[in-house]
């Protein structure tokens, strides 16, 4: 797992995959990136975010999800702009469908906007990836 470091000691990008909505990735910029490697190549068809414990102005509002076979050449899988995630804490977003699903072992999430640009921080507590609709 690589990505922009967290504001706090326990707020790094690994927090989005620990299955715990009480832990978050909280970053001191609005357009951070996280990259990770699956144990094997998988196709992601759907995904959603879970909001954090406070500050909904830091929610993601735009992002691009990429996949890669080698971790260096990236294919755009899903691009979302102008999204509105729940303002409630610890709450799952709507489910987003990958427009261009393909099997990859490496994935990258680039955040392109937060809910209230200018606030200076991005956060969410979980990213859930699925092969079929939940
Ligand atoms: Ca978490």
Image: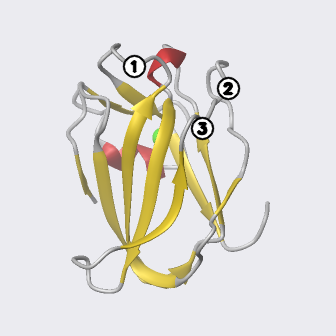
Q: Position of residue 92 (x, y in %)?
A: 68, 38
Q: Residue at x 29, y 33 (%)?
A: 10
Image position of 93 with respect to 22: above or below: below
Residue at far right of view: 134
Q: Nearer the viewer, mark 3 or mark 2?
A: 2
Q: Nearer the viewer, mark 1 or mark 2?
A: 1
Image check: 43 left or right of 18? right
Q: Where does label 1 land, which residue?
A: 117
Q: Earlier in the sequence, mark 1 or mark 2?
A: 2
Q: Where does label 2 land, which residue?
A: 86
Q: Position of residue 4 (x, y in %)?
A: 22, 43
Q: 89 or 62: which is nearer to us?
A: 62
Q: Residue at x 52, y 43 (%)?
A: 126
- Asked if the residues shown at circle 1 and circle 2 are in contact, with their CB atoms under 8 angstroms apart, the answer is no
**SS at mark 3 in the image:** strand
Q: Quadrant of the C terminus?
A: bottom right
Q: How is the image coloured?
A: secondary structure
């Amino acid at each position: 797992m690589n990505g922009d470091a967290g504001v706090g000691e326990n707020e790094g990008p690994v927090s989005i995959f620990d299955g715990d909505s009480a832990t978050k990735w909280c970053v001191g910029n609005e357009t951070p990136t996280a990259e990770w490697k699956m144990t094997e190549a998988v196709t992601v068809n759907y995904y959603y975010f879970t909001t954090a414990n406070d500050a909904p102005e830091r929610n993601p509002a735009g992002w691009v999800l990429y996949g890669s076979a080698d971790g260096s050449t990236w294919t755009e899988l899903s691009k979302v702009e102008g999204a509105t995630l729940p303002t409630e804490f610890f709450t799952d977003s709507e489910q987003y469908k990958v427009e261009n699903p393909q099997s990859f072992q490496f994935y990258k999430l680039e955040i392109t906007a937060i809910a209230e640009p200018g606030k200076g921080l991005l956060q969410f507590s979980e990213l859930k990836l699925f092969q079929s609709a939940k």
